[in-house]
Image: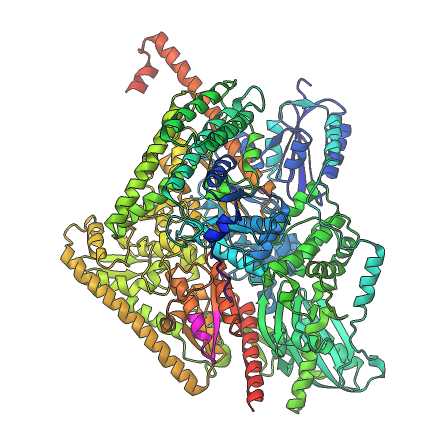
């Protein structure tokens, strides 16, 4: 028998059911948790980690399924089995994008897992914007959506500036302390119904950027690394074997493209679909409207970061999109689709030429937009240094870190060469200045 | 001496290499040693030796490199250099002008492109084609790696061996050996597989040319391996002096900080004591636990009889397995008289001959009434020695298990390289699980590890019983396991913990990967475990602990197949009285075998046949994909919808029109174009093109395109596309049409009608990775055929960019033709399906619905499994000939892919048809099928139907497939017999 499909009802919500949701980005998700509380949902973002999570995942999910499903479902079952929750007063929430990759099926795999575990009385909420599944107790209203987007903007802002501050801080811990402070500050603002209007967001972000810029930092140049990939594995330490922690030990600066780009990408896909294959013009209008709204929020973010020249601001979505114009088609939309390729070029353009492409082992869209595009990217942007890393519950850290180290060694080499070249050019210029541009060498290079 | 010595250590997966350079960069010392994973200890010993003999206590500059050295170096604060980078540093110094370096190590393979943009490629999660793989293969051949090199030099022919992963290759090699292929030929074939793996997996479209240098152990020690690389690359590479030491040399040159070796040793000692890893509870809490466990299992004993006192009828059972031969003789009452268990050393024939000779000479007063063979070598042994009966392994094991536990409801057998388990439902084998392409849960896996650590298997397994902190290694592939073990050792696990950890992971793999159960209740209440691997107490204990239930292990757990065969022989003889045909002593004495090779002309597969002639009309043919050469086409069913589809596609390939006004347009026959070929063929023909279709895939076609495959883990059908496009360009086609398609046609069976991401977007990969497509017009725009109204406009827009004179009206007409042709094609398939089903029913044939994707029709993708099924006399029909019978209904998953919706619909249809059974083809690496297989299985099992899944890849041997199919047929027979008994 197929697994039961229990709806999350209004009564359950009113009864104060705990809604468990997986974690991906600490800062973003803690703000979102707050936003949901304020809207009457007793959401709890799961933080459980460790071998128990993996064991539950392996036990209840088809082992050939991609690693995010194993981890997210493992995390749910680990939590449910922990005894911390009243199993008759708990619900689970999981996102469902409705795209053509396996991820849209996670919710069904979760239900199957619950059934196997004898817990299929627990309601599962699909968080989606595609009308795939609905539940009377869970409605994404326009105000809620706006608040969620606001917390994402804050999250992206903090992620962006903190990642550019932490590697250079002179007093270890300054950056993380500031993140904590802002997290508490924003939640306090939210509690008082503040911090969610565009005006407040702008003011807050400018303060955030200024605060981070005020952290005392060294001026050395560190190897710059960009991280792209499948969204869960890219962001979640549970999915990527604590990749960020590792990179922090490697004396480099890393950059993660924000969530805003992904949201815009998903909206843009709907418009693109109608352009490519025909469809409802009203739907297109609606999506265009939504896209413009999110782009306005994105503008706020970019402008705020650009107020301080010390920080590299993220590129606007429209620019990032233009980078792949002749590289990959805009119809390639499943998973991270063309955005994955575009983010690699965006990073390279912004000085993060050394790129880790983090993907679940056997990730289908990444065969195309990740590994499948590396060759072309090296032609489009010579000097780009990409290492694809597969994540899998049994792939070991040793192997992954070894490959990243290699990428970093190559990066170090390139940097050395560049410095030598700069030095040579400087010498040539000095020589040219002394000869007045008359010597044979100068003429040859001019001719 | 002005400057201190530089020391570079390269701690690889299996060895430590060391070089010492003096102040003029001369190598004054070097050494090479296996470390047996005792990394800290061996490094410490080596450094102490260097300090005493070479450095004499003076400060040195030391640097460590190598995949296994990282943890140690970092933990003890010794400078570390990534090993590929170290190679590059050394090559820049010693081999200027080098363009490409190919370096194979114990568990890694690397290619460095030095010319132009520096690019470094190393194997990711797959360790196929490395030194460890070669060692494993040598073990399989029963020779040392250096003997393997000598053998390869004598090769006369090369077999196709899957190159993706050691596990697959093994599945190819074993049957070749079992079928009597020459060891020399197999050795060379393995080397060629390594070469293919390296090129396909690592070069990823970048040509390997210019000055090529070979480095690392396998390439240093194996001249034939180098020769194979030379041959495949069409050049002659150089294996320089010190080719083993490049990583160490690079490390030495990188060394900058001065330190005393004695301080380094201290740091290593300090590091060694702080290590930790994920540990599991011990297998046994106390000695008492262990003895209670042993006492309990000692009770499961088979009835035996002293052979010396016995005279009369005996029955012979032989289980010719993948790595071992098990033979038993039982009395008229089924008591065990004789047993033998031996390794087959790659060739079972002489071993069986010696067993039979011994039997005949030592027991002249026994009458061999009948014999039966089971296992991989079944056909070979049957024909060689005239053994009366053959039976599929699953049935043999069931027969044996029932002798111990009449109401057994679950049997799990873990053998050398396979796991077999099945449920028994109402006395019928109901549900078979076989490990598809992975052997990580098997005996040879433990064996390989035991050998690598310098133990024999029994001794190694024994160690695990005493483990206090077994390593948690998880489940999954051997390849991953290698590095997990490495990491655990690095973290201080001792050999007992590793032994126990491996035993536990064997069990987890079997339970969660092969059977995929969540709890013991899933399996049954009366469980019998068997197979050689369960003789290992640690595995048995781990199994019971994991299931939290007691199971029965017969005292002949390793001989159950043979025992079951003997009981089967006895039962068959009672049903069919007669004389046994097992060779007499005389015939055994004059036994001879001769091997010849030929190509089968039965069909376009042109299988390479190996014929073993044993004289007196006894011969054994192998290498065949179908039963045509063996059966002479007699029992073979001609009701095969796959063949019928192939004919229809072939007709389209042949429908050329060289006079067409617009010239030629190429369509690669793969993924999304497979089923839509009638559509696009009609479309472009109507527009005035000469449509050139690439042929059905073949090995040659695959190899032609493999160098441009960017992702080695993508499914095989996708990889083949590269070959198809190459082929079209080779034909001189100037335009190729291969559209991207997020969506397929909506057949109203699902919530959405997507293609899977790979089917949808593979044209992007072709465009980005095949330089040759830029020499021609490669049209790979996004196209939606589901929006029939919008389609002509969109196509006009796309085509006018290449053919400006095309008009919307022309495209409209072409579209109408295309949709009509497609509808007619599908209608015809359905009609043919109906017709075949009706004929099968009239002829009393079984009907197998072989479900998969449209491109599984390709003979290179399905490896002739359709023919194999037809060879068993069954009718073969497709999912798309049945799915239209059903309406859309909710399923337990998000039903959003057109092709996959057909699977669910046809599965539901089959549950309503008593005489139909389902077999699902699944391409290895197909992420979507991780979802569909579970759902299809659920649909069938909810309705008491047997689910059979076959995983396919590059792999070409059908041995495992045959077992599965025969088991299915045996189960269907049994079920039918039971049903008719009930009705009667």
What residue is shown at x 36% (from left), y 7% (from top)? Answer: A434
Q: For the image shown, how many numbered marks are present on the structure?
A: 0
Residue A132 drawn at (x, y percent)? 39, 54
**Percent position of residue A3, x then y:** 51, 62
Task: State the image quarter where residue B35 is shown.
Answer: top right
The magenta-colored residue range is B906-919
Q: Is residue B913 magenta?
A: yes
Residue toward you, B827 or B694: B827
| Residue B588 visible to the viewer | no
Residue A221 visible, this orientation: yes
Residue drawn 64% across and 67% down?
B523
Q: Place residue B56 in its image quadrant.
A: top right
- Rendered position, B853 above or below B65: below
Q: Residue at x 64, y 59 (%)?
A: B441
Give above or below for B727 relative to A346. below
Q: Is residue B385 above or below residue B93?
A: below
Coordinates of residue A287 in the picture (x, y in percent) = 30, 44
Does the magenta-highlighted stretch encompass residue B970?
Answer: no
- Depth check: B833 or A371 in front? B833
Which quadrant of the view contains residue A301? top left
**Up/down of B214 relative to B321, above or below:** above
- Quadrant for the C terminus of chain B in the image: bottom right
Image quarter in which the N terminus of chain B is found = top right
Q: Nearer the viewer, residue A277 or B925?
A: A277
Q: Report the side of B85 relative to B292 (left or right).
A: left
Q: Give the percent coordinates (x, y) of residue A300.
A: 36, 29
Please, which colouring scheme is shown? Answer: rainbow
């Amino acid at each position: 028998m197929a697994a039961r499909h229990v709806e999350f009802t209004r009564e359950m919500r009113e009864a104060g059911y705990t809604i468990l949701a997986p974690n991906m980005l600490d800062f973003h998700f803690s703000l979102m948790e707050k936003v949901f509380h304020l809207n009457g949902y007793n959401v709890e973002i799961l933080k459980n980690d460790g071998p128990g999570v993996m064991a539950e995942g392996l036990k209840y999910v088809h082992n050939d399924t991609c690693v995010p499903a194993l981890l997210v479902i493992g995390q749910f079952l680990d939590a449910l089995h922990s005894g911390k929750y009243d199993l008759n007063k708990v619900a689970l929430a999981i996102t469902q994008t409705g795209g053509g990759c396996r991820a849209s099926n996670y919710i069904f795999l979760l239900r199957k897992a619950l059934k196997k575990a004898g817990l299929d009385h627990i309601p599962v909420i699909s968080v989606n914007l595609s009308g795939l599944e609905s539940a009377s107790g869970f409605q994404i209203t326009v105000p809620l959506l706006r608040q969620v987007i606001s917390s994402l903007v804050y999250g992206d802002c903090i992620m962006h500036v903190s990642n550019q501050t932490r590697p250079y801080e002179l007093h270890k811990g300054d950056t993380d302390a500031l993140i904590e402070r802002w997290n508490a500050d924003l939640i306090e603002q939210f509690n008082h119904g503040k911090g969610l209007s565009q005006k407040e967001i702008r003011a807050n972000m400018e303060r955030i950027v200024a605060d981070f810029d005020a952290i005392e930092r060294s001026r050395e140049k560190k190897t710059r690394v960009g991280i792209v990939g499948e969204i869960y594995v890219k962001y979640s330490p549970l999915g990527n074997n604590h990749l960020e922690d590792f990179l922090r030990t490697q004396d480099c600066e890393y950059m993660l493209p924000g969530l805003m780009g992904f949201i815009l990408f998903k909206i843009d896909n709907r418009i693109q679909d109608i352009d490519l294959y025909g469809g409802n013009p009203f739907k297109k209008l609606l999506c265009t409207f939504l896209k413009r709204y999110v782009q306005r929020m994105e503008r706020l973010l970019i402008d705020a970061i650009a107020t301080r020249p010390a920080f590299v601001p993220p590129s606007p979505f429209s620019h990032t999109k233009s980078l792949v114009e002749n590289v990959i088609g805009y119809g390639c939309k499943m998973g991270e689709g063309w955005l994955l390729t575009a983010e690699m070029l965006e990073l390279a353009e912004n000085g993060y030429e050394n790129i880790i492409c983090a993907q679940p082992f056997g990730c289908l869209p990444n065969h195309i937009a990740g590994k499948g595009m590396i060759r072309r990217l090296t032609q489009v942007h010579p000097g780009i240094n990409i290492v694809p890393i597969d994540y899998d519950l049994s792939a070991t850290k040793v192997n992954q870190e070894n490959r990243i180290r290699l990428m970093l060694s190559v990066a170090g080499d390139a940097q050395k060469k560049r410095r030598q070249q700069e030095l040579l050019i400087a010498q040539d210029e000095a020589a040219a200045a002394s000869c007045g541009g008359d010597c044979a060498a100068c003429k040859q290079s001019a001719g | 001496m002005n400057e201190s010595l530089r020391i570079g250590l390269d701690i690889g997966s299996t060895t430590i290499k060391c070089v010492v350079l003096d102040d003029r960069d001369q190598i004054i010392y070097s050494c090479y040693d296996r470390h047996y994973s005792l990394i800290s200890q061996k490094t410490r010993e080596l450094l102490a030796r260097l300090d005493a003999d070479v450095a004499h206590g003076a400060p040195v500059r030391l640097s460590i490199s190598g995949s296994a050295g990282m943890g140690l170096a970092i933990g003890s604060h010794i400078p570390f250099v990534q090993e590929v980078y170290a190679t590059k540093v050394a090559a820049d110094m010693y081999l200027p002008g080098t363009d490409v370096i190919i370096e194979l190590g114990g568990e890694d393979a690397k290619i460095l492109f030095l010319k132009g943009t520096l690019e470094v490629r190393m194997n990711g999660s797959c360790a196929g084609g490395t030194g460890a793989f070669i060692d494993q293969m040598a073990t399989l051949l029963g020779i040392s790696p250096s003997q393997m090199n000598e053998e390869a030099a004598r090769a006369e022919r090369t077999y196709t061996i899957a190159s993706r992963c050691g596990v697959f290759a093994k599945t190819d090699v074993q049957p070749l050996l079992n079928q009597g292929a020459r060891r020399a030929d197999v050795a060379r074939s393995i080397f060629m597989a390594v070469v293919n793996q390296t090129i396909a997996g690592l070069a990823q479209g970048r040509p390997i040319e210019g000055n090529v240098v070979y480095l690392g152990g396998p390439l240093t020690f194996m001249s034939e391996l180098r020769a194979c690389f030379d041959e495949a690359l069409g050049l002659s590479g150089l294996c320089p002096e010190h080719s083993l030491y490049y990583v160490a040399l690079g490390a030495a040159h990188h060394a900058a900080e001065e330190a005393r070796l004695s301080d380094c040793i201290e740091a290593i000692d300090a590091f060694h004591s702080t290590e930790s890893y994920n540990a599991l509870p011990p297998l046994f809490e106390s000695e008492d636990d262990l003895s209670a466990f042993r006492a309990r299992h000692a009770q499961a004993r088979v009835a035996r009889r002293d052979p010396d006192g016995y005279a009369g009828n005996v029955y012979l059972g032989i289980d010719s397995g993948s790595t071992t031969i098990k033979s038993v003789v039982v009395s008229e009452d089924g008591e065990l008289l004789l047993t033998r268990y031996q390794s087959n050393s790659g060739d079972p024939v002489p071993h069986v001959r010696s067993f039979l000779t011994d039997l005949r000479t030592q027991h002249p007063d026994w009458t061999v009434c009948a014999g039966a063979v089971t296992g991989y070598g079944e056909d070979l042994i049957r024909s060689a020695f005239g053994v009366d009966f053959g039976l599929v392994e699953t049935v043999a094991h069931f027969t044996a298990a029932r002798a111990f536990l009449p109401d057994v409801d679950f049997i799990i057998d873990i053998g050398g390289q396979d796991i077999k388990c099945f449920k028994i439902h109402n006395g019928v084998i109901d549900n078979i699980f076989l490990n598809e392409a992975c052997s990580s849960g098997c005996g040879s896996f433990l064996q390989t590890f035991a050998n690598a650590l310098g133990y024999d298997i029994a001794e190694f397994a024994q160690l695990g019983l005493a483990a206090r902190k077994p390593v948690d290694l998880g489940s999954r592939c051997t390849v991953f396991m290698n590095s997990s073990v490495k990491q655990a050792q690095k973290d201080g696990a001792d050999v007992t913990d590793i032994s126990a950890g491996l035993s536990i992971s064997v069990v987890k793999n079997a339970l969660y990967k092969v059977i995929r159960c969540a709890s013991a209740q899933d399996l049954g209440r009366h469980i019998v475990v068997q197979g050689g691997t369960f003789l290992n107490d640690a595995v048995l204990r781990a199994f019971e602990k994991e299931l939290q239930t007691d199971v029965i292990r017969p005292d002949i757990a390793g001989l159950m197949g043979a025992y079951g065969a003997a009981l089967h022989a006895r039962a068959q003889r009672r049903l069919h009285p007669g004389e046994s045909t097992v060779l007499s002593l005389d015939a055994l004495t004059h036994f001879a075998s001769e091997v010849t090779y030929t190509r089968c002309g039965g069909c376009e597969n042109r299988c390479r046949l190996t014929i073993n002639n044993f004289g007196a009309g006894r011969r054994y043919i192998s290498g065949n994909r179908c039963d045509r050469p063996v059966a002479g086409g007699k029992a073979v069913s001609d009701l095969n919808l796959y063949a019928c589809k192939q004919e229809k596609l072939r007709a389209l390939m042949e429908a050329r029109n060289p006079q067409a006004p617009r010239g030629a347009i190429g369509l690669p026959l793969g993924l999304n174009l497979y089923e839509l070929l009638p559509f696009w063929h009609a479309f472009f023909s109507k527009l005035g093109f000469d449509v050139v279709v690439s042929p059905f895939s073949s090995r040659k076609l695959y190899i032609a395109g493999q160098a441009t495959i960017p992702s080695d883990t993508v499914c095989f059908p996708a990889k083949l596309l590269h070959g198809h496009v190459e082929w079209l360009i080779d034909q001189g086609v100037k335009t190729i049409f291969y559209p991207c398609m997020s969506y397929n046609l909506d057949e109203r069976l699902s919530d959405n009608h997507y293609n899977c991401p790979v089917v949808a977007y593979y044209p992007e990969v072709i465009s980005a990775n095949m330089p040759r497509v830029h020499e021609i017009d490669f049209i790979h725009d996004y196209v939606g055929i589901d929006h029939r109204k919008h389609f002509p406009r969109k196509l006009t827009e796309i085509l006018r960019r290449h053919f400006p004179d095309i008009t919307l009206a022309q495209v409209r007409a072409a579209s109408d033709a295309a949709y009509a042709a497609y509808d007619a094609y599908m209608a015809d398939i359905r009609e043919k399906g109906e017709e075949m089903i009706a004929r099968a029913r009239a002829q009393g044939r079984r009907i197998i619905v072989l479900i998969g994707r449209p491109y599984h029709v390709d003979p290179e993708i399905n490896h002739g499994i359709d023919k194999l099924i037809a060879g068993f006399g069954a009718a073969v029909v497709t999912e798309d000939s049945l799915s239209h019978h059903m309406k859309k209904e909710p399923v337990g998953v998000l039903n959003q892919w057109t092709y996959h919706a057909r699977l669910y619909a046809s599965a539901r249809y089959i549950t309503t048809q008593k005489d139909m059974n389902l077999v699902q083809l699944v391409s290895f690496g197909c992420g979507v099928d991780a979802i569909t297989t579970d759902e299809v299985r659920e649909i069938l099992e909810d309705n008491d139907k047997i689910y059979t899944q076959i995983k396919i890849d590059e792999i070409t041997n059908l041995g495992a497939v045959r077992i599965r199919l025969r088991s299915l047929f045996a189960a269907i027979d049994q079920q039918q017999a039971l049903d008719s008994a009930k009705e009667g």
